Image (cartoon, grey):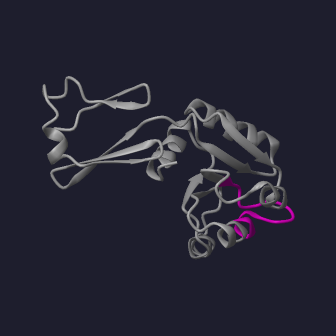
Amino acid sequence: MCCQYRIADGAFDYSGIYGSTDWQRSCPLTVHRYFVNIKNDNSYFSRFLDFTMTKVLVADDSSTMRKIILRSLQAVGVKDVAEAADGQEAIAIFAPGKFDLVLTDWNMPGMNGLELLKAIRAQDKAIPVIMVTTEAEKSRILEAIQAGVTDYLVKPFQPDALREKLEKHGC
């Protein structure tokens, strides 16, 4: 693998990589917020960088589940989290550019996760929205995909599964 690298003080430290920086010309590097893709031999290698600056909105009617999600986010390095007890509270907090990611439950009173997703997509088509749910019915999943859901995280989940989703979507 030609693209070994280290992260030093939030910047790329190229020293000591094959003794020179010649590999930079053959290994294009793209940075997406806190995520790095390094192209090498027509394949991409992705590496976790840092989620400490990531801002996340969590919407779930269960305070226990919000605490679990919050702890999982903290375990992967996310420090800036806003919580909402339902979709209506979440959409009142949400503003384009304010968050890097939205994690929402599907089943909530008032405005459910699908309605929240549609309301967010009306304001911001690009923000990753991940449904954290037990919903597994294909027709409902298809409905969420059509509404613009970015991904799913099935309850119960481990912090590593959450980290994988964050890395996958470059949050």
Q: Nearer the viewer, residue 79 or 73?
A: 79
Q: Is residue 82 above or below residue 112?
A: above
**4 w.r.t. 96: above or below:** above
Q: Residue at x 15, y 39 (%)?
A: 23
- Asked whether residue 49 appears in the rendered view, the answer is yes
Find the magenta span and give its range. 103-117
Horizontal and vertical percent for residue 92?
82, 58
Residue 1 appears in view: no
**Residue 139 at what x, y percent from top left?**
60, 76
For image coordinates 70% across by 68% down, the residue present is 114
Q: Is residue 76 above or below residue 147?
A: above
87 lies above or below 1 = below
Left or right of residue 22: residue 76: right
Residue 144 as seen in the image, left or right of residue 110: left
Q: Is residue 107 magenta?
A: yes
Camera-nearest residue between 107 and 29: 29
**Residue under the image location 81 percent in, 42 percent down:** 63
Say which quadrant the N terminus sits in.
Answer: top left
Which of the 4 quarters of the picture holds residue 65?
top right
